[in-house]
Amino acid sequence: MTTTGALDRGREAFERQAWGRAYEQLTAADHKAPLAVEDLERLAMAAYLLGRDDDSADVMARAHHECLRLGDTTGAARCAFWLAFGLLNKGEMARGGGWLARARRLLDDGGHDCVERGHVLLPGAVQSVEEGDSAAAEVAFGEAGSIGDRFGDMTLTTLARLGRGQALLQLGDTTRGLSLLDEVMVAVTSGEVSPIAVGIAYCAVIEVCRIIFDLRRAQEWTAALARWCESQPDLVPYRGQCLVHRAEILLLHGAWPDAMVEARRAGERLSEPPGQPAVGSALYQQAELHRLLGAFASAEEAYRQASHWGRTPQPGLALLRLAQGQVELAAAAIRGALDEAQDPLTRAAVLPAFVEIVLAAGDIPAARGAAEELSKIAAALEAPYLRAVSTQALGAVQLAEGDARSALASLRRACEAWLGLDAPYEAARARVLIGEACRRLGDEDSSDLEFDAARHVFMGLGAAPDLAQVEDRSRKDAPLRAGGLTGREVGVLALVATGKTNRAIATELVISEKTVARHVSNIFAKLGLSSRSAATAYAYEHGLV
């Protein structure tokens, strides 16, 4: 094999995005004779896309020093920037910051007006976004984008537009922010930017769409990312994130077995090379599926592992505690999660679970406040998914407040929205509440139909906890529900009827004695009772004991 032959094959494989072949041939050529700077940069990028981060950094450092030897200061700054980029993405802030400082010094000392000036602006702008200074970030990204436009560098222009779009979204300018992100994806899908920038843009845009609950865009770009990854079998970065996003979408659409397969594949992909923090997201998706299927022990372990990898286990872990009957613990966890959530988008991800859990704990005023906050966020974002979530939360609160007629209207709108989003599990949960509202209005036939429809969906999905709840509701709760009792109040009434004290009930349900007293007071008020003996008689009369 000649040096020229290996080099030509390496370059040709690089152009075809056959990263394994490119790395192999360029490395072989380098062993015969040291590569020139341009080919060293190709080799470094191929190594990066194969997940060989240390090799990539070593080769890029060689390219940097070769540029310095040749007197190519801007080239040396460019290599230093990409070295800093890779290290900062890995969380190696000291080394990454050092290379970034060198890139800036080289440019400043030489007084160069070049495209690299725009590249070195990007890390500082990203830091401003992370620190919450979105206005400063928007200005910095805009300046970097202007430099990219002036020098015709689409990779820089695209990365700058990506960051500026994210900053505008944080500033509440959804229309301009999404417009910029859509423009980013035009450049990405047209093959106008480098492969590293392509992967960054896909993952960032999909993540933003998830955060703002724009499921249509998230689904569209996830499918495109999957096609891009499949066209490059050797690709290691980005492929795991693609599988996480696919798992989330499959879960929403009710394809739970496929979602579990993708979540597990994502965990495997993201574990090699080790240290990729996105593995926490893959584990969280596995935990969510285990929880919905009723595999509580597996869910708890997966939530703990997700937390170990830096992914907060909330609100999933709090919902797990609720499903386990540990209402007090669930309420404490979800209140803490909501307290920590500062911006509206983060709060919107926690508020639905907050409403569900505090309703189970009997705190209707807190649930009402959370539902109203969620409605305001949904109105501002105009995202169909969030509108469905907020409308269902409002309906659940109205039902708990005893306004079954208003609840029925809200819940029917929520169910229609879920069906429009092809979200069968969420639609079935809405139908359970619709059945409850119909029952309280005396429409037993409609109530039975709604319960049956929900039961059919839960059986098909394997949602054992939800199936058990709907069976329990339809079997024995009808007379009690007509009195407006929540599920937790029904359980407390059953224990009161057995002669247990508030303290004994608190011990059995793993809640505080104060909470039990509040439930008992609510029961007496809703059923028009004045004593524990009267409550006991009511429970026996309706077959609860």
Image: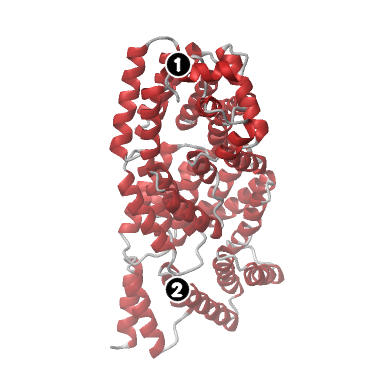
Direction top: furthest residue: 442
Q: Which mark is residue 541?
A: 1
Q: CA distance from mark 2 to mark 1?
A: 71 Å
* Residue 519 shown left or right of residue 179 in the figure: right
Residue type for callout 2: Arg
Q: Residue at x 48, y 11 (%)?
A: 405
Quarter holding residue 273 = bottom left
Q: Position of residue 345 (x, y in %)?
A: 58, 38
Q: Secondary structure at mark 1?
A: helix
Q: Work out which quarter of the rendered image holds the C terminus and state it.
A: top left
409 or 64, nearer to the observer: 409
Q: Is residue 465 above or below residue 53?
A: above
Residue 339 or 54: which is nearer the viewer? 339
The residue under the point 41% across, 89% down is: 33
Q: Is residue 201 visible?
A: no
Q: Can residue 456 be spotted in the picture? A: yes
Between residues 375 and 317, which one lies in front from this camera angle? 317
Q: Are marks 2 and 1 in contact (CB under 8 Å)?
A: no
**How far from the left and from the top, in percent, is residue 517?**
65, 27
Task: Please tell me whether residue 302 is drawn above or below residue 216 in the rendered image.
Answer: below
Mark 2, Cα crowd under 10 Å, few <14 / some 14-19 / many 20+, is some
> What residue occupies the far right of the structure in this picture?
109
Name the amino acid type tagged 1: Glu
Residue identifier under label 2: 52
Residues 373 and 457: in front is 457
